[in-house]
């Protein structure tokens, strides 16, 4: 009879513990879901407040706060679940502190990643949506965390970099970009006429392309090639629009030069016949 009662109490304890664990997990997921909505509303209201932050900075901080909130909620839920098993939490935390100190000496890379992540966010080296080049990787920043950052290449690959490896960063999204276009003109053409045609075209382009911030500038002759005269055009555009605008300028210049009858050089081959040389010499001797 005693064994039966003890077994029944055990099953009741296990059932109550399982119910408590399920309740803790449910409340944790509910807190995270509500927290996400509160954080999103907070950043939405921040746009109408007196203290404005850039959109790129806002996206970075939004993801960081969401991740930090999730880690804190999961940690608290884990501690509460351990408490359900009637474990001494204080002793576990004290032991974890000593163990963490010992592990910290062996996890220097992890500590370095966290510290580097803090300075990346604090100094605003780059934010979500920026196009950067770092550690042999180039692409758009998808996420900036305390330990890692995610960079998506334009071909679709996602590179996950430890923050400690981000030692030198080239950010292409902070300031305006410059489109650089080299145009080749045949030596037989009138260079001054070609310059006038290109300058007239440059005045028209800002009305067609909103990304152009200024009228494109013709710098002049950049190089004298083997079969062409190379002229350089530069144009200030919005960040990350320099590649698209360079392609557009090449197309516009090509069409305008064709319309004006100005030749863009192309490879040519001139053939001489050896049999013609003796005959020409004989004619000269005679």
Image: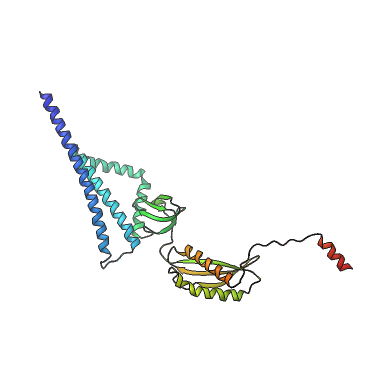
Viewer-nearest residue: 98 or 27: 27
Q: Residue furthest toward the right?
A: 286
In which quadrant will I find the N terminus?
top left
* Residue at x 25% of width, y 57% of height: 39
Horizontal relation, residue 229 to residue 277: left or right:
left
How many labels sit on residues? 0
Q: Residue furthest toward the left?
A: 1
Horizontal relation, residue 30 to residue 262: left or right:
left
Horizontal relation, residue 286 to residue 182: left or right:
right
Q: Position of residue 115 (x, y in %)?
A: 35, 53
Q: Position of residue 119 (x, y in %)?
A: 35, 57
Q: Position of residue 189 (x, y in %)?
A: 64, 72
Horizontal relation, residue 150 to residue 264: left or right:
left
In which quadrant will I find the C terminus?
bottom right
Viewer-nearest residue: 151 or 145: 151
Viewer-nearest residue: 70 or 95: 70
* Residue at x 38% of width, y 47% of height: 109
Can residue 15 be seen here? yes
* Residue at x 82% of width, y 62% of height: 277
Can residue 89 be seen here? no
Q: Is 89 located above or below residue 236 in the figure?
A: above
Q: Residue furthest toward the front?
A: 259
Q: Position of residue 81 (x, y in %)?
A: 21, 40
How was this image coloured?
rainbow
């Amino acid at each position: 009879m005693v064994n039966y009662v003890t077994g029944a109490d055990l099953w009741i304890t296990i059932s109550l513990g399982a119910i408590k664990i399920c309740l803790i997990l449910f409340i944790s997921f509910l807190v995270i879901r509500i927290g996400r909505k509160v954080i999103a509303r907070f950043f939405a209201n921040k746009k109408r407040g007196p203290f404005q932050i850039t959109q790129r900075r806002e996206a970075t901080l939004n993801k960081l706060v969401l991740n930090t909130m999730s880690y804190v909620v999961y940690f608290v839920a884990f501690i509460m679940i351990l408490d359900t098993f009637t474990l001494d939490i204080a002793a576990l935390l004290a032991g974890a502190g000593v163990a963490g100190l010992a592990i910290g000496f062996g996890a220097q890379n992890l500590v370095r990643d966290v510290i580097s992540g803090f300075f990346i966010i604090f100094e605003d080296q780059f934010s979500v949506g920026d196009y950067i080049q770092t550690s042999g990787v180039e692409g758009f920043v998808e996420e900036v965390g305390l330990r890692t950052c995610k960079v998506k290449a334009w071909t679709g690959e996602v590179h996950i970099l430890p923050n400690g490896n981000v030692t030198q960063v080239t950010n292409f999204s902070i300031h305006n970009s410059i489109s650089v276009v080299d145009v080749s003109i045949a030596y037989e053409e009138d260079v001054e006429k070609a310059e006038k045609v290109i300058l007239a075209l440059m005045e028209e382009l800002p009305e067609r392309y909103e990304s152009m911030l200024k009228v494109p500038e013709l710098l002049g002759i950049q190089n004298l090639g083997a079969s062409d005269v190379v002229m350089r055009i530069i144009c200030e555009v919005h960040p990350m629009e320099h590649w698209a605008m360079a392609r557009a300028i090449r197309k516009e210049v090509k069409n305008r030069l064709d319309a004006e009858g100005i030749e863009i050089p192309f490879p040519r081959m001139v053939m001489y016949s050896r049999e013609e040389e003796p005959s020409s010499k004989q004619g000269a001797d005679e």
